[in-house]
Amino acid sequence: MLNGEKKIERPLRWGMVGGGRLGQVGYKHRIGALRDNTAFKLVAGAFDIDPDRGKDFGMNIGVEENRCYPDYKTMFAKEATLDDGIEVISIATPNGTHYEICKAALNANLHVICEKPLFFTSEEVLEIKELAEKKGKIVGVTYGFSGNQMLLQMRAMIKKGDIGEIRVVDLQYTHGFNATDDADKYSDAQKWRVDPKIAGPSFVLGDLSTHTYYMSQLIMPHMKIKKLLCDRQSFISSRAPLEDNAHVIMHYENGAVGTMWASSINAGCMDGHRIRIVGSKASLEWWDSNPGELRYEVQGKPIQTLVRAMPYLDDICNADERLGALHVEGLSESWANIYLKFAIAIDAKDRGDEETLSKLIYPDINAGLEGVRWVENCVRSANNGSVWVDFVEALDKTFI
């Protein structure tokens, strides 16, 4: 169980790019990083494309005025001259900026924590992965839901064979908040998400389904996709060619089948984030709306509900427990769990502790690469008439 005691020698000096007053995700990053005040300390930021607004915001969350910078390039240059300069940055900016900021940060000898989807193409990810390895730095990806510890319980039960051989994988991340085009017109945070130059080759496939796809990999690391078929739609026509709804069918190498439904036009749906894994002996099901419970259905036996923090759960699950039974945890604790693991990974990398790194389960650059590959393959299938395509490692840019 976690209780806030330090896992690394001292808090890492941390800066943010983006995540300011008008951003949708910046506060989630800060909640995650600062929940354990022994892991990170926010000392600098280039919080906004508007320098004055960014400075005002930074000072209002406790950053010194002279370390609220007008842009990330200035921040990297100035911080490099300080004895207590930043060691790691988080990138909480629109998708189209991730690659250039990440590359600049690594070249400034900084560790990186980046929003998803990581970049536009797997070629870009492979280039950054090589650079990160050369610089000896960590690149983490904020799949913010993946720190929910009941996902690790699913992983442990599947590994032990509790549900038998996996036959069906049913994934869903849907909501209804873009069922009309109102947000596209009036919300800056939504406008860029439906602009291909900024968002990349997809909307909900990149914005939503990459979360759930990574979580499925976390739960079932041995399961590899052989081929898939993607059908995507732009029900709000102004969003074309980007989709606001998509269905994906997957065939896995072991013969299992899977589906993914990603949608932001599921009218009336407040939270449709769900994972169901069906095996030959039993099934497991998890919902984001009730993340502290796991439904366990054994064929021929009464349905069981497993509850977080209980002693009957696997040690790998309870190691990430924070509040104890009877006290509700949720997304904030999930973000805190992955940020703590980012800190442990960065500290281990700096110390050359490869053993710790090899055992740590967190969304690293390989997870980011898989997310980009997922989007690339889905887009390739959809753009070629919703046909079956082999799930390949890297795609030529002409496909997207």
Image (tube, helix red, strand yellow):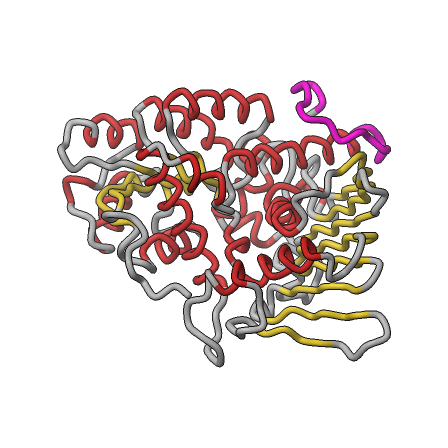
Relative to 179, is 133 on the left or the right? left
Near-viewer residue (222 or 133): 222
- Prevalent SS, magenta region: loop
Residue 106 percent location from the top left of the image: 36, 26
Q: Residue at horizontal 51%, vertical 47%? A: 361
Image position of 85 with respect to 20: above or below? above
Residue 306 percent location from the top left of the image: 63, 73
Dividing the picture into quarters, in which one does residue 62 lie?
Answer: bottom left
Dividing the picture into quarters, in which one does residue 112 lie?
Answer: top left
Near-viewer residue (321 or 397): 321
Image position of 93 with respect to 245: above or below? above
Relative to 34, is 150 on the left or the right? right
The verdict on residue 398 being magenta is yes
Image position of 151 with respect to 51: above or below? below
Q: Residue at horizontal 83%, vertical 47%? A: 257
Residues drawn in magenta: 383-399
Residue 265 percent location from the top left of the image: 69, 55
Image position of 44 with respect to 339: above or below? above
Near-viewer residue (392 or 310): 310
Dividing the picture into quarters, in which one does residue 45 lie?
Answer: top left
Q: Residue at horizontal 83%, vertical 52%? A: 167
Relative to 373, is 63 on the left or the right? left
Residue 153 percent location from the top left of the image: 60, 61
* Residue 93 makes an appearance in the image: no
